Image (cartoon, grey):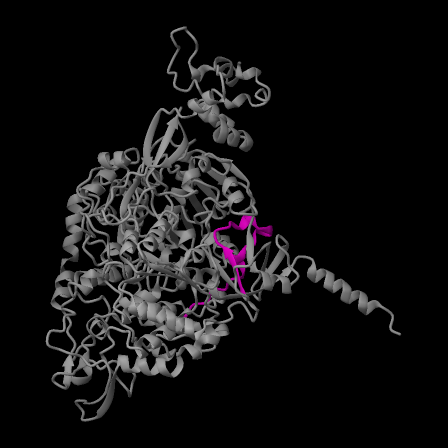
Amino acid sequence: MKPGKNPGMESKPGMIGMDRRSFLKAGGSALALSLCHLELLPMNAMAQAAGKDGNGNKAAAELSPLEAAAELEYRSFEDLYRKKWHWDSVAKSTHFVNCWYQRNCSWNVYVKNGIAWREEQAATYEQVDPNVPDYNPRGCQKGACYSQRMYDAGRLTHPLRRVGARGEGKWMRVSWDEALADIADRMIDVMRTDGPGAITWDPGTANAGGGASTAPYRLGFILDTPMIDVNTEVGDHHQGAQVTVGKISFSGSMDDLFYSDLILVWGANPVYTQIPNAHFINEARYNGAKVVSIAPDYNASSIHADLWIGVNSGSDAALGLSLAQVIIEEKLHQPDFIREQTDLPLLVREDNQQYLRQRDLKKDGREDVFYVWDEKTRSLRQAPQKSLALGKLRPALEGRYQVTLPDGRKVFVQTVFSRLRQQLDSRWKPEQTAATTGVAPATVRRLARMIGKARAAIYLTQSTFSKYYHGIEMERCQILVLTLCGHIGKKGSGITGFPAVSIDGAQSAVIAPGNLPPSLGGLVVAAGAAPAFIKGKIAGKSDEAIIYDIVADKYREGSFIAGNLFYYHVGLQALYGSSKKYDKTMKRELASFLEESYQKGWQIRPPQNKQRIFFELGGNILRRARGYDVLEKTLVKELDLLVTIDWRMSNTALHSDYVLPAAGWYEKDDILWATPLSPYIHIISRAIEPLGESKAEYAILCLLMKAIQQRAKARDIRHFNDRTGKQRRLDNVYDEFTFNGRFPEDKPEALLEHVLSQTTMLNGIDWKTLKQKGYERITGLGMNFINIGNATDIKPNETITANTWHTEKKQPWPTLTRRIQFYIDHPYYLEQGEQLPTHKDSPPIGGDYPLILNGAHTRWSIHAAWRDHPNLLRLGGRGEPTVWMGTRDAASRGIQDNDRVRVYNDIGAFETLAKVVPSLRPGQVIIYHAWEPYQYKNHKSYGTLTPNPFNPLSLAGGYGHLQPLPEANTPGPTDRDTRVEIEKIGARTAAAARQSAAAAKPKP
């Protein structure tokens, strides 16, 4: 039977015989696009023909769809499926997106007629350890449909210039030359008049380890244009970890869970957020591990746990303190471990609440030398600095001692452990915290005993607590519990932070001089860091601590801007500075803390210039920023130029002046950074040509620098002054950017070859081999700032366990005391009464309302990248934004499932659908993140009612490890404490009508 004559087939003439040109032509219609791509392209039986066949028939590319249909014969439906599994080529690739803890996965991308029409998990990871599970397969539903996402109606394919009002959605298609020349001229004008500080870049969160990240950082290095530091802004900065262990980047691998006997899923939901990794948790259970879920909601991970502890939202610090109290009271702690690894034996003065330091006992004594009481000699002894090994010392854990100061005064000192124990026993027994946490005392004691008696216990990594106002304390208390029991730096155990690793070969391509070969430039960069290394070594610091010092010094030069501080100064001061309004423990306004922090150099003030130009490079600040609707009226309104580089029309793109189309993830070559959870560096590769006129990010920025150089020469403008007043050249910026043409826009693989040639942690693999394989397991940490905090040797046939350098090699921790540090005598911590880990009730951010609005990471998207994809909208439920409500809260408000509701507080309101579920505790509601504002009525999302006040502790600095750094130790978000009320749409109107009718009724 001819398919053209088959009943029902005549109405779909485009389904067979489509080549790339026909396919892209059909892309003008979203309906035709989805039909062709999802159902019909794989049936193209003529696609493999390269010319006329032996009978003289026309090539497939020359046939119309109807002609192709007439040429294809089949006997049964099975033939259609046989034809479907034909392809022209297969490429190794993955997805250029920050899917974070589940990051990354190797995929095979199948190409036919120049179209990427299907992908599947490669499942080729070698088994690391024969005693543990392997990493196969890796992938999720988002990656499995990217070949559909990249061709949908939201894809950007041509440069666009705004012709209507910002946000109106009126565009004109322009050429690349026209767009880049105009942007270049405006940049030159601003750099000459206002300086480069008036031009800011947002790199987004989907950074790479190759060209897509090298390009903006190198551009910023050459033009001195600052870049937003995104990590703290979005709340992945783990500030409690930074405060306690001096770093945020550390984690073991997921297969290390097979050595655990207790897995604590505390504040996490890995079934949603670590889809490719979740099987390791289940396999560890098969191996005998117990899994405990600690979360307010009975979520998708809780149902697979051995024990669920339903803690009240925002009370995790109180739970941690109660666990610590029981652990110490019942002697479940490990005294020798905490003597060696922590500050708990260090002595604190009772008169001023500060550590006893060498400066207190000697003239010109140091600030970072501390003391213990030695039980053997019964004397005051200096705590070791260069090593954690105690030798013959036996520091007392408990005790109160008298010390004579040089002026003859006598002061009493106590160990940190003594102070901690007194605090725990006085306020944090399980019976005292039950009302706060909602957890029964017997349950707390049961969990404390499980942790104390476990051979190897571990917390699964999460970034939940970083988004609470008092999240610092939640993380400090969480770390305290495992540290007391010695569950750090041994197989199957550990505290976990920001789990990142990246290749260490890209730095020379970012900051090396362009007039030198990049490899030689890398030596120049290393030589520049040598004095700091020598100084650090003399002071007895580890490589890890020295690297952090160097990076902190570089951060002060202003290449990065703390994201939330930037927003504070461009329109969000009233919201972000409203801390004292909600936090009754503050004795002064947030502005006072911030100005003091700026004056003392603790935090770095963003550039004072009025912002003139803003570049969005794959990020989305007008969805991501808390209070984005205010930024639309302040920052965006005042900008001369807003440029977005993206592959999709985001909310920020909608408000832009230019939108430049980035190539899709199967349309370019690059190397991606990774995570120790899955310790493989992956690549994306150019399986097909970029759609339309889209270009890879590296190529776009190369061309922008070329346009700046050309326009500067044409206008006879040779120089500009950077932010320090130093003169820099404008007429050679492209040459500088590309290292005199070594890495031009049309040769991205040359840059990637260089990066790999400088990388020390991938066993010498080259780009050709990596492109064929798709990934490579990391073999070490190198000296990369992001990597070094993992502090462990990576062995070829072993799982990864973080922080073994500290526990096995006795290398000091990168804190002020060189130990895991639970006592912080910084002035802000003393002022707020938080020198020891503590709990404070969540402030009623947004007003005195009964419901706590929690956010959570969505299962059906990664940020906003898939939030409007039809398949995932169907899988995810209602096809539009929802707020999850518990059955009791919904019933008490007369709300039923799928009712349209209004969510409001003192800051604002938005409308959405109610999803009524039995899994939430009373008083808690959840909105899973990443919905675009344009998916809400009037473009008003949950981000419009989150004031995001800063916790003053986040402004601390000038204190050893408390210094602003890339990705850490600057103010983060506080949206998890937002209070709201919810009402059914129409309910208030109906009530008002009834009240009005009653008032109008004649009185008897």
Task: Give the residue drawn at x 45%, y 24%.
Answer: 81
Q: Is residue 945 magenta?
A: yes
Quarter of the image where one finds residue 731: top left
Q: Which residues are magenta?
A: 924-951
Q: Is residue 758 left or right of residue 584?
A: left
Q: Check the image and report above or below for 170 versus 604.
A: above
Q: Is residue 89 left or right of residue 933?
A: left
Q: Is residue 407 magenta?
A: no
Q: Is residue 974 left or right of residue 789?
A: right
Residue 364: % across, % down: 15, 80
- Between 982 and 190, the one lying in front of the other is 982
Q: Check the image and report above or below for 888 versus 34.
A: below
Residue 798: % across, % down: 21, 51
Camera sees residue 271: yes
Camera sees residue 741: no
Quarter of the picture holding the C terminus: bottom right
Task: Give the residue drawn at x 36%, y 34%.
Answer: 667
- Between 461 and 282, the one lying in front of the other is 282
Looking at the image, the residue that sits furthest to the top is 55
Residue 652: % across, % down: 48, 48
Task: Give the residue drawn at x 20%, y 57%.
Answer: 792
Quarter of the image where one finds residue 886: bottom right
